[in-house]
Image: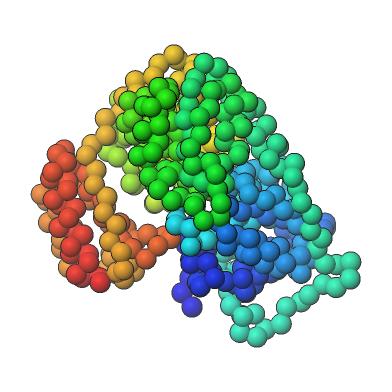
Amino acid sequence: MGRLFGTDGVRGVANADLTAEMALGLSVAAAHVLAEAGTFAGHRPTAVVGRDPRASGEFLEAAVVAGLASAGVDVLRVGVLPTPAVAYLTGALGADLGVMLSASHNAMPDNGIKFFARGGHKLADELEDRIEAVYDSHRHGEPWDRPTGAGVGRVREYKEGFDKYVAHLVGVLPNRLDGLKIVLDEAHGAAARVSPEAFARAGAEVITIGAEPDGLNINDGCGSTHLDLLKAAVVQHGAAFGIAHDGDADRCLAVDHTGEEVDGDQILAVLALAMRERGALRSDTVVATVMSNLGFKLALEREGLKLVQTSVGDRYVLESMKEHGYALGGEQSGHVIILDHATTGDGTLTGLMLAARVAETGKSLRELASVMDRLPQVLINVPDVDKSRVHTSADVTSAVADAERELGETGRVLLRPSGTEPLVRVMVEAADIEQARSVAGRLADVVKSALG
């Protein structure tokens, strides 16, 4: 069996790759592994379980809850809430485990399972490996040690989770948002209620789109992966700017008042300067991935700030932040981690902090985002290839070397296998957009022919 856990939990087509049986088995395995690791020692264990609005989340949540309770874990069901809300509540309620059912920005037929450790932090790789091994052994016949009688877990709804999380978001803002008109695109996802409520409580005038989830329309032509609707709405309503989340609301992208996109790199740059002014940017350092635009690095250098780069995936950004005590990190895709207030990327928190900076300075988001100039960057996803060979194929290696020689010091090339989908991402930066497109197109053709 190939490794189930990717960079962000276990994902696949619900009821095909990710079945109820798998969800139940992984949940039981997680309970056993954490018990063996001593997480539950001396007390009755508790887990927080939440989901996004996907139709498949209903049966997968039931399977996860059944698995945990059968393993002796009490379960607090928080219902449809963002991934960062489940992480926050896991920590705030002193739970031993958090489970989120979501495939984030993926299309509706997909779903996923993400586990959080005590405190709301993502599980370490070695624990995920152990869960997978235990799950596999029991899937092939090894019996579980099952509690009976009063030893089984109890299940109850925790409806207070919504208000507790929104109060937390509003409570950490440095200033109110009065006077700002903001359009929010909720991707028909997990933040459809949370995000508008938080922005309104903070004082903003809120206009929502993509805020009517029906279980089938999540990420469908809206949200952070489809910004056209938000761009049009911001201009139509004369809003100060717009915020877009993905299906589980751990991402935040923005649109300025003219309808221009403000990506995760620009958001990080704006927040970095704001946090430095407040003395909250520890070591004057921002953590980002190798996918960050070269213009972001140059902007930080110009402002006297340091950049630490990691592998792609917010889990690696978070690991670096925790190891060295940094306060701000994130990805170009809009995963932004503000570690003093969240243990994972939080799209609603990021949007609120960005809005607070606009309100505080009186400057437009367009002006604030101009702190960095984005170099032309082209990203091509090459699907249906053997992504495991992207770094070992001689043809691909040769093509990358040729591209790097052509670009020289004015650009760069990055090829990487997706952690959540069967594809290879080809990224090229260059001083000229046409050159970036040409080089990226040639590389994508080589990847397709060599790895297809």
Residue drawn at (44%, 14%) of the image: 362
Q: How many marks?
A: 0
Residue 99 position in % (x across, y down): 64, 56
Residue 44 position in % (x across, y down): 82, 58
* 274 in relation to 133, above or below: above
* 148 in relation to 74, above or below: below
Task: Check the picture and name the quadrant holding the C terminus.
Answer: bottom left
Residue 24 position in % (x across, y down): 65, 70
- In the figure, is residue 131 to the left or right of 149? left
Residue drawn at (36%, 33%) of the image: 232
* 19 in relation to 184, above or below: below
Which scheme is used to colour this image of the protein? Answer: rainbow
Query: Which residue appears farthest toward the bottom when viewing the image?
Result: 141
* 142 in relation to 374, above or below: below
Q: As rendered, which of 180 and 421 lies closer to the eye?
A: 180
Q: Quadrant of residue 322?
A: top right
Q: As rendered, which of 196 and 313 lies closer to the eye?
A: 196
- In the figure, is residue 65 to the left or right of 190? right
Query: Which residue appears farthest toward the top when viewing the image?
Result: 362
Query: Which residue appears farthest toward the left when viewing the image?
Result: 406
Is residue 305 something one can see in this rendering?
no
Q: As rendered, which of 410 and 69 lies closer to the eye?
A: 69
Is residue 375 something one can see in this rendering?
yes
Residue drawn at (42%, 25%) of the image: 237
Residue drawn at (13%, 43%) of the image: 434
Residue 218 position in % (x across, y down): 49, 51
